[in-house]
């Protein structure tokens, strides 16, 4: 057996080679799809097969992008939206986890509040937009509130559910050593649910984006959501399309950030904390 | 002063829930001598775990009392160590960190106790694995680590709740041998719950046979083998083993 590790078998080499070819092919195809899509879009618009006034056109989007950048507005808009999203995300995660801890702590409280959580969870949160604007004012704070409205309840329910599903025998084990409720939480419930909480984070990133863009649609003077709505109102499709694509890139980047965090935690200090 | 370290007096337990009342155990009384090994056997679901939880102080009985060293049990006692069905080592802690869990919870994590825990790891062959994670150990080693975690808080009495039932049958025999010798070596009193008649006979000085739910004591058997330095395996090969087995088997009245 140990020999096989030293001199790799021919089958193994063939297999590894096959997997490498496959990986490269996958990436080439992925790139090809996006290149083809944009190229045909560009050509179809040039040939007047589609009306670039309503569909826009890649070359015009690039111009719009450069224009936005040179006017110094682009980074501001991206920055505002990202900041609101990160703020909504972090506040939603922390607040949601704290509420989940409180509800886990007191079974009676969580039982009392259960119907309210169910109602709030099923309510389309967008409906709360006007209320936030009146209460908080038409600004970034109202937009963050919108992001919170969308992500908070889901976070609470997800995290609470994970806490409640902690292996009862693991809890019994620490109780046999005389652990109190706080120790049960710190020694078992919290650490054993770190993976579940990171999964909640992943869902949360997406929801925060939804909340922020919704908020920006309703009220804003800057941000990608603002650009999209503004572009739509003045029928400036180049601006709308450009903003959507920037938005897609930003959201994907942030999601990858959480995935990276998850990898770090599950292979890093999470496994080595005292 | 009596030699009995544990006294169980007329203990009964009724579980209450919205759907009704479950009468788990009824009027159980027996005592356990210091340094002895007592098993409790009974059909599954009869209330064995319930009885053990009551002895440990995790659960308050509906009636009756338990005394440890003459003191009534009202909450979990530092004199008691518990071993559950599975090892429940925490994946996110190293073996050493798992072993000191009880000390941490009892806020007894001083250098002396840390040394004691490390010594246990040394004595029982896990020292080289102390910085490994549970997933890197075999089932038998994990069970041993779980026992060391229990021993690290220096209990006088060990409660074992089907502690070997998660292991496959071969590992189980070896681990039983292993754990038994550790318990005897450390001079601990042990109360073990099991539904395995052979296991109970092979390890115990006394076997308490429970009826099906609500559990009452059917009989208490004194197990004596004229065999020096007894071990579970030696007992299993002893001629009188069969006799004890048949006796208890009939009493348990197992139906298929
Ligand atoms: N917390 C509980 N609430 C209600 N009923 C319980 C509870 N724990 C155990 N029981 C019931 O009590 C009976 C005895 O359970 P247990 O002591 O676990 O049996 P055993 O360990 O002998 O298999 C079972 O019928 C079980 O359903
Ligand atoms: Mg049981």
Image (tube, coloured by chain):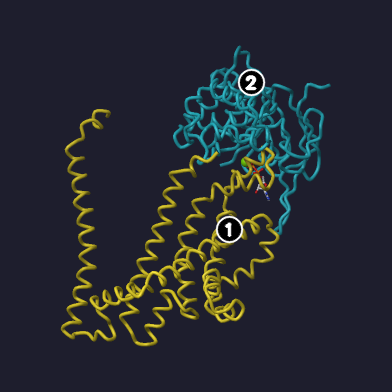
Chain A in the picture: what colour?
Answer: yellow
Viewer-side residue, A168 vs B32: A168
| Residue bearing mark 2 | B186
Quadrant location of the C terminus of chain B? top right
Question: Which percent across, then down, holds residue A42?
Answer: 20, 77
Question: Which percent across, then down, holds residue A16?
Answer: 21, 44
For disc 1, the chain is A
Q: Which mark is residue A97?
A: 1
Distance in Å between CA atoms under marks 1 and 2 = 44 Å
Q: Nearer the viewer, mark 1 or mark 2?
A: 1
Q: Does any portion of residue B39 appear in the rendered image?
A: no
Of all residues, the one furthest to the front in this rendering is: A71
Q: Quadrant of residue A231?
A: bottom left
Viewer-side residue, B119 vs B47: B119
Mark 1 touching mark 2, by CB under 8 A? no
Q: Quadrant of residue B46?
A: top right
Viewer-side residue, A185 vs A224: A224
Q: Quadrant of residue A93?
A: bottom right
Question: Which percent across, then down, holds residue A121?
Answer: 56, 70
Q: Is residue B240 left or right of residue A214?
A: right
Of all residues, the one furthest to the top in this rendering is: B228
The residue at 47%/77% (across/down) is: A216
Callouts 1 and 2 in the same chain:
no
């Amino acid at each position: 057996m140990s020999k096989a590790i030293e001199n790799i078998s021919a089958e193994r080499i063939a297999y590894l080679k096959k997997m490498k070819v496959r990986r490269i092919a996958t990436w080439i195809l992925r790139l090809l799809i996006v290149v083809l899509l944009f190229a045909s879009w560009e050509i179809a618009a040039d040939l007047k097969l589609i009306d670039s006034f309503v569909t826009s056109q890649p070359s015009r989007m690039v111009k719009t992008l450069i224009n936005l950048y040179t006017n110094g507005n682009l980074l501001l808009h991206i920055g505002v939206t990202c900041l609101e999203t990160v703020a909504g995300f972090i506040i939603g995660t922390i607040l949601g986890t704290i509420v989940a801890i409180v509800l886990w702590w007191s079974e009676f409280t969580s039982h009392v509040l259960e119907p309210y959580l169910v109602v709030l969870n099923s309510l389309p949160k967008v409906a709360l937009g006007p209320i936030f604007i009146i209460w908080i004012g038409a600004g970034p704070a109202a937009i963050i509130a919108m992001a919170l409205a969308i992500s908070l309840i889901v976070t609470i329910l997800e995290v609470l559910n994970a806490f409640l599903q902690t292996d009862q025998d693991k809890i019994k084990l620490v109780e046999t050593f005389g652990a109190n409720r706080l120790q049960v939480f710190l020694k078992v419930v919290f650490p054993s649910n770190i993976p579940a909480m990171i999964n909640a984070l992943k869902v949360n990133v997406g929801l925060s984006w939804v909340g922020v863009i919704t908020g920006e649609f309703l009220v804003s003077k800057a941000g990608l959501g603002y650009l999209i709505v503004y572009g739509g109102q003045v029928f400036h499709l180049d601006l709308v399309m450009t903003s959507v694509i920037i938005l897609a890139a930003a959201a994907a980047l942030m999601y990858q950030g959480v995935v990276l965090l998850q990898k770090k935690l599950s292979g890093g200090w999470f496994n080595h904390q005292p | 002063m009596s030699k009995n370290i544990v006294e169980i007096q007329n203990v009964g337990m009724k579980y209450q829930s919205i759907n009704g009342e479950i009468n788990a155990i009824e009027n159980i009384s027996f005592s356990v001598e210091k340094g002895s090994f007592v098993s409790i056997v009974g059909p599954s679901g009869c209330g064995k775990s319930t009885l053990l939880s009551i002895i440990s102080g995790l659960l308050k009985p509906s009636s009756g009392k338990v005394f440890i060293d003459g003191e009534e049990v009202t909450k979990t006692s530092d004199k008691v160590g518990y071993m559950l069905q599975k090892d429940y080592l925490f994946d996110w802690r190293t073996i050493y960190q798992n072993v000191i869990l009880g000390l941490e919870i009892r806020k007894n994590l001083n250098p002396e106790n840390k040394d004691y825990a490390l010594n246990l790891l040394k004595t029982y062959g896990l020292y080289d694995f102390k910085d490994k994670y549970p997933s890197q150990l075999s089932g038998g080693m994990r069970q041993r680590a779980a026992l060391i975690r229990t021993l690290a808080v220096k209990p006088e009495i060990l409660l074992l709740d089907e502690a070997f039932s998660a292991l496959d049958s071969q590992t189980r025999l070896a681990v039983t041998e292993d754990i038994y010798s550790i318990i005897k070596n450390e001079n601990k009193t042990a109360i073990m719950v099991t539904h395995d008649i052979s296991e109970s006979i092979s390890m115990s000085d006394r076997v308490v046979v429970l009826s099906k739910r609500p559990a009452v004591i059917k009989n208490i058997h004194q197990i004596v083998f004229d065999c020096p330095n007894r071990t579970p395996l030696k007992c299993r090969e002893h001629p009188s083993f069969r006799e004890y087995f048949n006796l208890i088997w009939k009493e348990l009245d197992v139906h298929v």
